[in-house]
Amino acid sequence: MPATDFSQSEYDARLTKTRSAMATQGIETLIVADPSNMAWLTGYDGWSFYVPQVVIVPSSGTPLWWGRTQDKAGAAQTTWIGDDNLFDWPEEHVQHPDHHPYDALITLLRERGWTRALGVEMDNYYYSAASHRILETAFGRDAIADVTGLVNWQRAVKSEAELAMMRKAGQLTAHMHATLREGFREGRPKNELVAEVQAAGVAGLPGLAGDYPAIAPIAPSGLEASASHITWNDRPLVRGEATYFEVSGCYHRYHCPASRTLFLGEVPSDIRRAEEAVLQAIEDTFAAARPGVACEEVAACVYDSFARAGYVKANRTGYPIGLSYPPDWGERTMSLRPGDTTPLQENMTFHLMPGLWTPDWGVAITESFVVTPDGAQPLADIPRALVVKS
Amino acid sequence: MPATDFSQSEYDARLTKTRSAMATQGIETLIVADPSNMAWLTGYDGWSFYVPQVVIVPSSGTPLWWGRTQDKAGAAQTTWIGDDNLFDWPEEHVQHPDHHPYDALITLLRERGWTRALGVEMDNYYYSAASHRILETAFGRDAIADVTGLVNWQRAVKSEAELAMMRKAGQLTAHMHATLREGFREGRPKNELVAEVQAAGVAGLPGLAGDYPAIAPIAPSGLEASASHITWNDRPLVRGEATYFEVSGCYHRYHCPASRTLFLGEVPSDIRRAEEAVLQAIEDTFAAARPGVACEEVAACVYDSFARAGYVKANRTGYPIGLSYPPDWGERTMSLRPGDTTPLQENMTFHLMPGLWTPDWGVAITESFVVTPDGAQPLADIPRALVVKS
């Protein structure tokens, strides 16, 4: 972001797609609280999602931004919607036990006559149960429908401009992994290595500056690596342990996550066997992931490769990615897993997660890809093999 | 974190305080979704809060951790509550359109007979409107009370062990600001400087490793600085612009935020006048902030200093801090603002935010402090004056 990253016609197209989905679901006014959806629709950018803020999409006309007074200047600087469409709630509401910013949202909606056929994101981030109750109390339960994911689904197929952003994020991710391979050595405290890798992603490359990713580096070692979401500590890297490193570059809020597994010393045969199964799973998936193929068929490439190697993989093996804010760089629509029959479309983008976690170690080598008529193409160019130093 | 950062007696005391508040509010079983509250009660640490997870506090016995299967190993590694008290929801629920992890939570609560006098955090992060509806549908609206902030309030007065953590975070913050002062110069792309400052906070100091802070660096320059929550971009630092830098070190999830304002070139007189008012506000506040003084009296020190300089400050000027996860390092209980009559207690900790934002520039110099009988003591040692380079 800002909004100037994309043409007005691209924003218009996003709005048209969103309104079409609204019409299908009988929604006249959509209230969007997910900061990724807010940014995708208007360009809004800022670390302000810790207080209530929304974009309102009426059935016609320009969307409205509504947020804290302090953040209105940021909305003026980053969105395309114009000052007339920025509305703020009074500062005295901020984190107050006795009143709530949504009281002001009710007033705004009433003034506009937008009090029925409202759509909200009941299971998205930063739309609290308390906020929802305030809307229900004002307008009645029947006036409000849950359309979680409505906007997220419109984001699934990327424009060429978005793909260019994601490839730039992928260059940052590759730079981060190069820094990681270089700096990974016995005895090094993990936090030192994380500091270098993060700095590589933000300092970036000539003409290519990095932004903060939506997830902090995940970097468990040894026994820790049996836990999927451990971040880091100051324990030195030791021989005989695998370290799993999951990071993403971020370019103007677009992501391209990739994980690699690193090992100090002689690699045990069971970890080598897991590596082979994971690498084969990536090859098979990339060959299969063409338009029209179902998500579950793509996932089967991973499960089958693991099964041939004698492993059972029980969790999903990928999800869509793109524009995002903390706490998740996934889009929370499709999943690469059994039962998801959504057909792939050209220019959808996924983070493929073929990982194996046993009680004693974890091995994961993951890739972000775009769907093309010729199969999946990786969005970053990073050597895939286990990184081994002895 | 992990839980071993604190003694078992400290965790017991936290639980006792929490249960006392539960009893006062008629709560038999408390469902805690805020990751900061989960960590404070059990030690749980991991970047897993993007999917549903809670700590359940029954009226007696050990609390339960409930989360995604993938994260159970992380809970075993980081909490004190023991493997028997870890419960997981099946992986197939993750971000699925047709079923929800809270369905499994209902089953667990029914098995335990915890189906009435439930307390939930309706306005905390990561407790969605959809999750709340599932609980209401299962147990009825009357079985569930909103106790947002119940645990947050118990965190307000810090133990000596917690203050030690926050002072270590303060050393990291000071190290970040030293790196900032050193690296701030004309023509430097902002993202390069942010990369260095972040790396300083994570690489840390000998024996003092940094964690990820709950808020990314806020670093607007010039006109951007009229917007409070702009992060960074690749624009080079230019003469005649103020840059506002808000960062925090993070030590084992404890924070100590501090902001400074930096300027390249000759400082205009209106910015100097704002600086003087801000520095005086800090002095006055630190002298006033003793046990028994109300939050609004502390805030008045800031407003009065600004008023004497001819400025009107319209927003709150501080909030409690401590243990936290993204998206906010505040505790969301008290505020330093008019109308908040909460009396300060010894060992409460706040981020004091005397900042002035005009349409053209922003100046803020902020300090984290602990309340003592002799007034406020800063938790970090950082030169306060405008950082000026010509």
Image (cartoon, coloured by chain):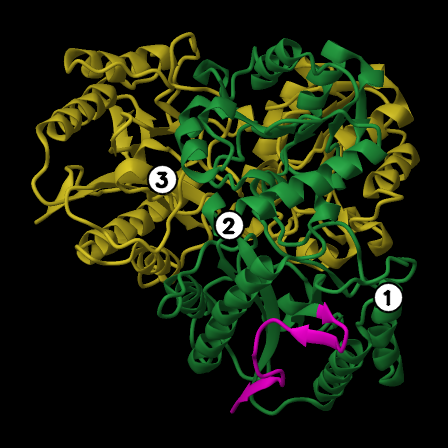
Chain colours: A green, B yellow
Mark 2, other Cα within 10 Å: few <14 / some 14–19 / many ≥20: few
| Residue A326 visible somewhere in the drawing | no
Count of marks overlaid on the render: 3
Q: Position of residue B328 (x, y in %)?
A: 49, 37
Q: Which residues are magenta?
A: A371-390
Foreground mark, 2 or 3, reads 3
> What's the CA distance linking mark 2 and mark 1?
52 Å
| Residue A341 position by quadrant | bottom right
Residue B33 versus residue A18: which sits nearer the camera?
Answer: A18
Establish if A366 lies above or below A6.
below
Establish if A283 lies above or below B178.
below
Q: Secondary structure at mark 2?
A: helix
Dot label at residue B5 = 2
Tell if the residue under mark 2 belongs to the same chain as the one under mark 3: yes
Q: Position of residue B76 (x, y in %)?
A: 69, 56
> What's the CA distance linking mark 2 and mark 3?
21 Å
Q: Which residue is mark 1?
A: A292
| Residue B328 visible somewhere in the drawing | yes
Which residue lies at the image location 33% right of the left edge and 12% below the top edge? B293
Q: Which residue is mark 3?
A: B257
Q: Secondary structure at mark 3?
A: strand
| Three-letter code, disc 1 | Gly
Residue B10 versus residue A365: which sits nearer the camera?
Answer: A365
Q: Secondary structure at mark 1?
A: loop
> Which chain is indicated by disc 1?
A
Q: Position of residue A112 (x, y in %)?
A: 64, 13
Q: Position of residue B304 (x, y in %)?
A: 22, 11
Mark 1, other Cα within 10 Å: few <14 / some 14–19 / many ≥20: few
Foreground mark, 2 or 1, reads 1
Q: Compare marks 2 and 3 and give the one earlier in the sequence.
A: 2
> Which chain is indicated by disc 3?
B
